[in-house]
Image: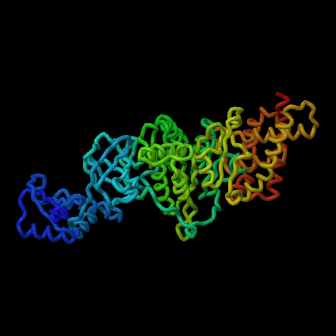
């Protein structure tokens, strides 16, 4: 009895019984593979005419027509990546393909619910591997324990039940990639959801990929202009940088990201907008806006809605990053926006708690830092030897009551290369974009600015800091000297200049001319309420009367002392004419 207990019982399913020679061959094969005595049984099955299925417990050897067809289909898909024509592709595949009786590991579903399945029997499954459930549903291994595997499901769990079979795919989770995704709206699995038909994929990339090493990178040295003067002048973003956009709800975080995408028109930058946990109606409106301004021609929108399962929301940023890496590896420049990582962390917390992981500080699992670090570290400026491509990340994080010291914000602040902090008080006072000059920072700094912008920005940040400090101390004082009054008026003019309408990004030349004009005190005597109208007229006057100046700044990216003086003098002259015209009116 002890011998029989140690023996492996295998079953062969076929429409006809195997011959004695075949049985001996199967028994010898299994004994050699598992190093155990084998008891082989035969069961008649009409499901496999002209073939057989050998069930050895955890592993199944498929030699059925359907199994061989599946092998052939996989071989065709792998060969398709070569880019050959359809006819030659099929000829080569048929000529070189040899069917093999490969083993498939089969497990059983122990329990399922809330998008999580517990599976037993797959002892060799790896973390991040895709499992195939009955009904074609896919899942990804997320938890490995002694007795069972925790798996997240990417489709509805309605068709998966306890006792159903599940098999390994041997592949890690991946998404289709290719040029065809540009201009489309897809879900977290790369499937189109915009009703415009299928997307032809060039290849597949794993959603989890190691970040480029130090040797593969290059220092950030090229600007990625947002078109927002408050950011480009004081907190410049470089290609390959990770700049956090942080602030309370409804303070204009997505608006900054949207303006940045619109500003990349005709700049050869591929934009990827990843939406996590947002309403589908909001994303539809965003896509409509991008189409209106011609930005969908170079943008991919990847959407995991609030109604999607936690696994779909969890995988979305990694899928978007994999798509961005495809373009970056081809030497292209990519801008990727994660909107937002607060909801991503919440989705991951839901998964972790359902998988039985212990919560820690503020109820988040202990590896939540690794959740975002392994995502954001994949953004880089690659070296010339690696193609010179770049991927710039603008992650968005929502705070509660302006608390940047909360768990998730502090984590992501420590991962990124700076943050743009949006203040609720500034936003509701009409200062939009509501960038807080004191708490915002770019650790790349002037390396991501052109020489013209660096020279034009000058002391604006210091001047604004002095104005904010003076404003606090003088709000309770009624008796102010003339110097203080002038400083306050000057600061108010700077703040008004930094106000900018949405969907109206400035060119680099326009920003340089505005900064030179403001810092030369050309706007000193302009009433605060008239600054917006003055700026509009000033820029129009520069374009019509000083086209050569604008052209030099745009083409060279430099601002000579002569050009600076010419711009300042012109702005002061225009301000004098504007003041006279206003008095006459």
The x, y position of residue 111, in whole percent, is 31, 44
Q: Which residue is drawn at 26% across and 48% down?
A: 134
Q: Can residue 380 be seen in this snapshot?
A: yes
* Count of numbered circles on the image: 0
Nearer to us in this view, 216 or 314: 314
Task: Place residue 246 in its image quadrant.
Answer: top right
Nearer to us in this view, 520 or 187: 187
Q: Can residue 577 be seen in this snapshot?
A: no
Task: Place residue 81 in its image quadrant.
Answer: bottom left
Q: Quadrant of the C terminus?
A: top right
The x, y position of residue 479, in whole percent, is 93, 32
Query: In the figure, 546 relative to 252: above or below?
Result: below
Left or right of residue 422, residue 105 in this image: left
Q: In which quarter of the image is the N terminus?
A: bottom left
Q: Residue at x 75, y 38 (%)?
A: 496
Left or right of residue 363, residue 439 in this image: right
Query: In the figure, 1 relative to 291: above or below?
Result: below
Left or right of residue 103, residue 211 in this image: right
The x, y position of residue 135, in whole percent, is 26, 46
Q: Which residue is drawn at 8% across and 56% down?
A: 15
Which colouring convention does the figure follow?
rainbow
Nearer to us in this view, 427 or 476: 476
Q: Which residue is drawn at 58% across and 45% down?
A: 396
Q: Residue furthest top?
A: 585
The x, y position of residue 330, in whole percent, is 49, 63
Left or right of residue 384, residue 557 in this image: right
């Amino acid at each position: 009895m002890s011998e029989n207990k140690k023996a492996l019982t295998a079953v062969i399913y076929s429409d006809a019984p195997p011959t004695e020679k075949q049985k001996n061959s199967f028994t010898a094969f299994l004994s050699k593979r598992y190093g155990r005595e084998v008891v082989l049984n035969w069961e008649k099955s009409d499901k496999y005419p002209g073939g057989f299925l050998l069930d050895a417990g955890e592993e199944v050897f498929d030699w059925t027509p359907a199994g061989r067809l599946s092998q052939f289909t996989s071989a065709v898909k792998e060969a398709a990546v070569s880019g050959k024509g359809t006819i030659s592709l099929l000829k080569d595949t048929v000529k070189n393909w040899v069917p093999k009786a490969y083993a498939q590991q089969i497990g059983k579903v122990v329990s399922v619910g809330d998008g999580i399945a517990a599976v037993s029997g797959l002892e060799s499954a790896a973390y991040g591997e895709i499992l195939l459930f009955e009904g074609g549903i896919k899942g990804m291994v997320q938890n490995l324990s002694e007795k069972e595997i925790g798996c997240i499901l990417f489709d509805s769990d309605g068709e998966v039940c306890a006792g159903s079979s599940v098999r390994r795919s041997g592949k890690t989770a991946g998404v289709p990639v290719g040029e065809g995704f540009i201009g489309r709206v897809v879900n977290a699995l790369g499937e189109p959801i915009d009703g415009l038909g299928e997307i032809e994929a060039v290849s597949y990339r794993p959603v989890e990929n190691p970040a480029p090493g130090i040797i593969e990178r290059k220092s950030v040295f090229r600007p990625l202009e947002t078109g927002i003067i408050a950011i480009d002048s004081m907190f410049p973003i470089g290609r390959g940088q990770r700049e956090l956009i942080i602030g309370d709800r409804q303070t204009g975080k997505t608006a900054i990201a949207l303006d940045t995408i619109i500003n990349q028109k005709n700049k050869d930058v591929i934009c990827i907008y990843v939406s996590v946990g947002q309403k589908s109606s909001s994303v539809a409106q965003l896509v409509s806006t991008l189409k209106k301004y011609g930005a969908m021609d170079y943008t991919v929108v990847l959407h995991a809605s609030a109604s999607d399962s936690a696994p779909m929301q969890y995988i979305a940023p990694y899928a978007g990053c994999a798509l961005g890496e495809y373009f970056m590896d081809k030497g292209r420049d990519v801008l990727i926006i994660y909107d937002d990582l607060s909801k991503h962390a919440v989705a991951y917390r839901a998964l972790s708690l359902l998988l039985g992981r212990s919560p820690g500080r503020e109820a988040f699992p202990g590896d939540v830092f690794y959740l975002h670090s392994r995502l954001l570290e994949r953004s880089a400026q690659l070296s010339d030897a690696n193609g010179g491509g770049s991927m710039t990340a603008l992650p968005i994080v929502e705070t509660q009551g302006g608390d940047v010291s909360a768990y998730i914000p502090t984590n992501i602040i420590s991962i990124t290369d700076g943050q743009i902090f949006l203040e609720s008080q500034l936003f509701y006072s009409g200062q939009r974009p509501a960038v807080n000059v004191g708490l915002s920072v770019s650790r790349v700094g002037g390396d991501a600015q052109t020489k013209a912008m660096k020279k034009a920005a000058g002391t604006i940040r210091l001047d604004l800091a002095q104005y904010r400090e003076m404003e606090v101390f003088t709000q309770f004082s009624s008796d102010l000297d003339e110097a203080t009054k002038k400083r306050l008026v000057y600061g108010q003019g700077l703040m008004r200049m930094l106000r900018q309408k949405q969907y109206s990004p400035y060119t680099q030349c326009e920003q340089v001319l505005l900064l030179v004009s403001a810092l030369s005190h050309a706007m000193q005597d302009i009433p605060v309420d008239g600054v917006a109208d003055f700026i509009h007229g000033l820029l129009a006057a520069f374009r019509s009367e000083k086209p050569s100046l604008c052209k030099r700044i745009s083409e060279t990216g430099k601002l000579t002392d002569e050009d600076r003086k010419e711009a300042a003098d012109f702005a002061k002259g225009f301000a004098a004419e504007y003041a006279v015209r206003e008095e006459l009116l």
